Image: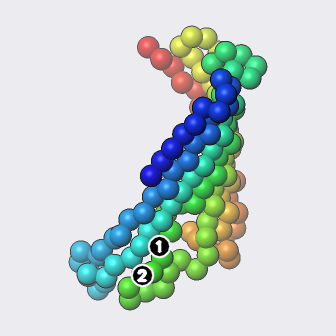
Amino acid sequence: MQGDWRVTKNIAVAGWAGYVNAEAKDGINENNKADIWNWSANIAFLDLAKEGDVFAIAGGMPPKATDIEGASADKDTSYIIEALYRYPLKDNITITPGFYVILNSNHNSDNDTIWVGAIRTTFKF
């Protein structure tokens, strides 16, 4: 399930949620079932400093196994939070610095928080 809404000319919100009823097809857990959930939500601000730019913030939960036959469900809940700014340098070149953080990685609060930064350059031909 997903949805998006253009609140104003310069603000858009969106979100989605997913569910899978998975079944092991072989191995020691063959025929065991598990529920797997995930979701995300974001807000984007368009044309803030320049026509074509986008500043966005998003957050969500990566796939999490719950109600697992023959095993324990994920102990905790991981979350991902992301921010990015896409800036058009020219009609066919954009640069997008951004970062994201993963809290409770692998759905385990004993794991360290993971921080990742990136810069992406896109060329259109």
Nearest the viewer among 60 and 115 is: 60
> Residue 57 lies in what quarter of the image?
top right
Query: Helix or strand or loop: what does disc 2 sit on?
Result: loop
Q: Is residue 61 above or below residue 11?
A: below
Using the image as rendered, state which of residue 79 and residue 89 is in the foreground: 79
In this rendering, position of residue 1 left or right of residue 5: left
Residue located beneath label 2 in the image: 68
Q: Within 10 Å of the Cα at label 2, are there few (<14), some (14-19), or many (20+) other Cα atoms?
A: some
Q: How is the image coloured?
A: rainbow
Report helix, strand or loop for mark 1: strand
**Visible residue check, residue 35:** yes
Residue 9 percent location from the top left of the image: 65, 23
Q: Position of residue 32 (x, y in %)?
A: 31, 82
**Residue at x 44% of width, y 14% of height:** 125
Q: Residue farthest to the bottom?
A: 70
Mark 1 is on which residue type?
Answer: Ala
Residue at 48%, 76% in the rendered image: 66
Tell me if label 2 and label 1 are in contact, CB under 8 Å.
yes
Q: Please give the label number shown on residue 54.
A: none
Indicate the quadrant where residue 25 lies: bottom left
Which image quarter: residue 91? top right
Kind of residue at disc 2: Ile
Q: Nearer the viewer, residue 2 or 64?
A: 2
Q: Spatial distance from mark 2 to mark 1, Cα to Cα?
A: 7 Å
Q: Which residue is mark 1?
A: 65
